[in-house]
Amino acid sequence: MKTLKAVKCGETVKVLKLHGEGAIKRRIMDMGIVKGVEVFVRKVAPLGDPVEVNVRGYELSLRKADAELIEVG
């Protein structure tokens, strides 16, 4: 299983599945990250936290813990 946390800078991936429960999953979905959407990884901070991505035409920063919940392919 490959997660968004493992994606390198400059790659575009497609969301396959969201893991997590309740409020955490709902918050990720509210940010526009849902199954089938393409995510472009713009930047990764030196220590890996946060990850800056482009989703549906806007920029978003995700914590490492949240990026681990997003399965991509």
Image (cartoon, rainbow, N blue to C red):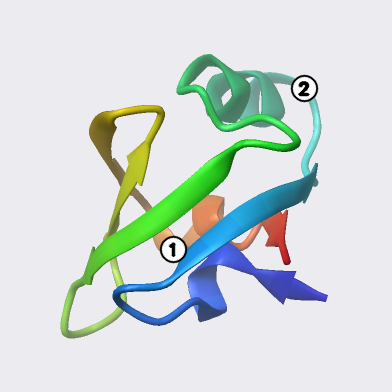
Neighbourhood count class around disc 2 (C-alpha, 10 Å): few under 14, some 14–19, many 20 upward: few
36 displayed left or right of 40: right
Q: Residue at x 30, y 73 (%)?
A: 10
62 displayed left or right of 18: left
Neighbourhood count class around disc 1 (C-alpha, 10 Å): few under 14, some 14–19, many 20 upward: some
Nearer to us in this view, 11 or 17: 11
Location of residue 60 in the rendering, given as x and y in whole percent from the top left corner: 28, 38
Location of residue 18 in the rendering, given as x and y in whole percent from the top left corner: 76, 42
Give the vertical position of 49 relative to 61 (above or below): below
Please state the total of marks drawn on the protein image: 2
* Location of mark 1 (residue): 64
- Quick one: label 2 or label 1, which is nearer the N terminus? 2
What's the amino acid at mark 1?
Lys
54 displayed left or right of 39: left
Location of residue 42 in the rendering, given as x and y in whole percent from the top left corner: 24, 62
Which quadrant of the structure image shows residue 33? top right
Q: Are marks 2 and 1 in contact (CB under 8 Å)?
A: no
What's the amino acid at mark 2?
Gly
Number of the label disc, if any, that sits on residue 22? 2
Location of residue 59 in the rendering, given as x and y in whole percent from the top left corner: 22, 37
Q: Is disc 2 placed on a helix, strand or loop? A: helix
Give the vertical position of 5 relative to 18 (above or below): below
Q: Is disc 1 placed on a helix, strand or loop? A: helix
